[in-house]
Amino acid sequence: MTTVDIRPLDPADDASVRALYELKRAVWAKDLPDNVPPDLEDERLNLTTSWPGQLHERFLGWHDGRAVGYLDVEFSTLENLQNAWVYVEVHPDFRRRGIGRTLWAHGNIRSTDEGRTKVGATAVESVPGGIAREHHALAFLEAMGLESKLVEVRRRIVFGTVDWDAMDVLLGEAWSHAEGYQLHKWVNTAPPELVDGLAYLDGRLMLDAPMGDLDIEAPKIDAERFLAAEATADKRGRTRYNVALQHEETGRVAAWTFIVTAPHHRERGFQGITIVDPDHRGKRLGTVGKLELHRFVRAEAPALSDVDTWNAASNSYMIKINEQIGYRVVDSWVDFQGEVAKP
């Protein structure tokens, strides 16, 4: 077993930040080389800018003067006060030496210190028809006593392979079911008159989307928290391309979807929320929103070539829409959860 010196990561210490970046680069090259590679400046922003309602404690594990492991313990501060999420990464050259277990144990100690009783983590797994992944992360979490609670499947659309004429036909057909709704499109800052409705939909996501067996509380999102998240995204350099549908008769925001990019990966977008108010379902608003969003983002961000989206494996409705549009499976992201291990 390799001895590891676990030290808090100081965002002001440039050598430590660079060591973290090099460690993440090595993990990326080994585990997810088709993913967006880490970026040094983005790591700096990540270390100094937290999303509303989140608190992070980060550590590096050192061995012989080299950063060989990374630990990120995430605490929710506004809800889910019984939960902690622990992220562990070990340099590929130093795996299977007990470093991951040492970091995990430290994460459980900090979780106990903060009064948390449940711990969660995520592991990536292969799926049929997707990209091959190693199984070590799932095996590790199972060995730590956690159980699989939610399986999400990642899909990716490559714009260069899409029949856009066929998508225009599909969009026209979907709009024929969605009379009485006004389309809104914007980049980054939401129109003030839509903020309350968007915050309501944002808070509904965990109530409406399948969450498996996770013991997790939906966030309480109001306009203030929504705007705080927008401000954080701006600080992180995230560009968000948004589409919403507003019910003309009542003025309610009935559907919302967005894609986000970052300065170091303008070619790869990531699907954020896609949600339809339960009172307005059955009118193809999900399909309208997604296709209008693709049309919008292709015009606004010509460098964007592909987009990733995640759906619970049981979310057959959204999966059907995504596959009809052209999303294809990449891999599976499995959320685990269990009791915090007592020191």
Image (cartoon, helix red, strand yellow):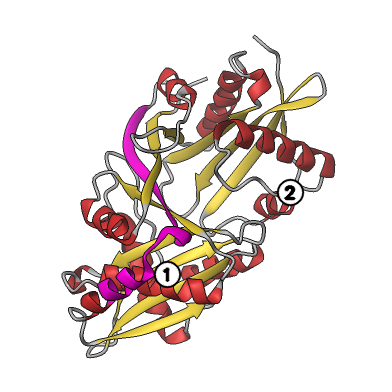
Residue 87 in the image: state x and y as whole percent.
Answer: 54, 35
Lower position in the chain sequence, tag 2 or tag 1? 2
Residue 288, quarter of the rendered image:
bottom left
How many discs appear?
2
- The reply to whether the magenta stretch includes residue 157 is yes
* Discs 2, 1 touching: Cβ within 8 Å: no
Q: Is residue 109 left or right of residue 283?
A: right
Quarter of the N terminus within the rendering: top right
Circle 1 — which element? helix
Residue at the disc numbered 2: 40
Q: Amino acid at mark 2?
A: Leu
Decide if residue 200 is in sight here: no
Circle 2 — which element? helix
C-alpha gap between disc 2 and disc 1: 29 Å
48, 53: nearer the viewer: 48
Residue at the disc numbered 1: 294
Q: Is residue 142 left or right of residue 254?
A: right
- Crowding around mark 1 (Cα neighbors within 10 Å: few <14, some 14 to 19, many 20+) is many
Q: Amino acid at mark 1?
A: His
Up/down of 317 relative to 5, above or below: below
Decide if residue 236 is in sight here: yes
What residue appears at the point 28 percent right and 68 percent down from the top-left corner?
286
What residue appears at the point 20 percent right and 68 percent down from the top-left corner?
278
**Residues rendered magenta in the picture:** 147-171
222, 265: nearer the viewer: 265
